[in-house]
Image (cartoon, grey):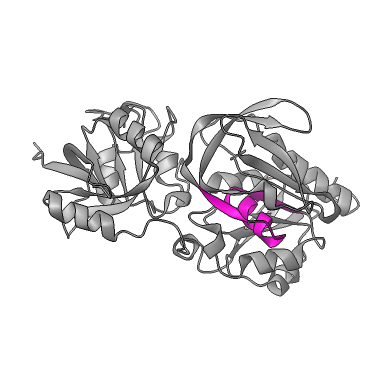
Amino acid sequence: MTEIKQGALVLEDGSLFEGELIGYEPDQGYASGEVVFNTALTGYQEVITDPSYAGQIITFTYPHIGNYGINAEDFESSRPFCRGIIIKDLARRHSNWRSDTNLNTFLVDSKVSGICGVDTRRLTRHIREAGAMPGAFGTANEETLLTAAKNEPGTSNIDLVAEVTCPEPYFVPSTRNNGSHNKKIVALDFGIKRTIIKHLSMIGDVQVVPAWTSAEDILAYEPDGIFLSNGPGDPSSVKKAPETIASLLGKVPMFGICLGHQLLGIAIGAETVKMPFGHHGANHPVKNMITGEIEITSQNHNFAVDPETLNGKASVTHVNLNDGVCQGLTIAEANAFSVQHHPEAGPGPHDSAYLFSEFDQLMDKVNGGQDA
């Protein structure tokens, strides 16, 4: 029987939460990062392997985690980039015909630390009131954990994209049967999720390139469309990307998601702001300002575009009904649009999946429909 090790989580403000350690045991006796919470009821594997959580410790508000195990098909990246996970109850056994292993074994193999038995309801309420903040958890004493939390820089003013972007370009062939006339999409990888690549490959061939790729190198692929991916951290700290995006605007149809949406905003002169505790969950109501319809969406971001700074250079297309945050932009004259939420949404919801079709149709319209 595995030895149960008592541990604790200490936040930057000194708040203490006791629990039991799971997953990988860090060499220094603790793991640290910015503590956020996610309200999704399912999809813990997709959440843990989403590169957008780089630099963060994920608190799951749903109390029972690990009940359907881990499988090889639902990874959103090659490995987790999060700093750790916090849960209330780890399932003692997993049960699902698709599972290959259990959550705890996966955490150990991936060198991701975790703590369970935590009062996640109390922790979530604290973050909602005080805001997301750095924290540290492990077997170290309270003083050491507090020092580690205070020394943790968080996610502001740090280029976390550099940790998650692909080191070299790679190609994903289209699954759409159009013979030799597939559309060509260049996807800038700021921490792209595999499910997004899957959706894009249903439209055309996908050339994924590192975040620092120049506009000239992107255009050399002769793309029919350019995609700006999701990713972690502070958009204002992502080097070169806004300038690259600005120089590409109007030349090729463009679609951005999450961090890609924020970088598109910065590229046209808008500013971004850090939210108190961000949006992390799968049940956010978003209003489509063009159709008037309400979409239930998946969200994962701590920063947002300030619509007051758009200065008429773009129109707001989507708004979060919980707090009024800008969720979408369109730059009609440049054939570019973006959304803050995740239309690929693994495992769901899928209300916004139509946006990939809109990208497909936009490329047809601009490029003369040669792939129709």
* Residue drawn at 52 percent across, 56 percent down: 191
Which quadrant of the figure has residue 350? top right
Q: What percent of the width, then of the height, locates residue 98?
A: 40, 32
Total marks in image: 0
Given residues 233 and 257, the one toward you in this image is: 233
Side of 257 relative to 55 (left or right): right
* Residue drawn at 87 percent across, 53 percent down: 366
Q: Quadrant of the C terminus?
A: top right
Q: What percent of the width, then of the height, locates residue 258?
A: 59, 48
296 to 144, vertically: above or below: above
Q: Is residue 202 magenta?
A: no
* Residue drawn at 43 percent across, 49 percent down: 53
Q: What percent of the width, then of the height, locates residue 352?
A: 66, 33
Q: Quadrant of the N terminus?
A: top left
* Residue drawn at 22 percent across, 46 percent down: 14
Side of 228 relative to 236 (left or right): right
Q: Is residue 264 magenta?
A: yes
| Range of residues picked out in magenta | 254-274
Q: Can residue 226 be seen from the camera position used here?
A: yes
Given residues 343 and 269, the one toward you in this image is: 269
User: Which residue is at the far right?
Assistant: 368
Side of 60 relative to 202 (left or right): left
Q: What percent of the width, then of the height, locates residue 280?
A: 47, 38
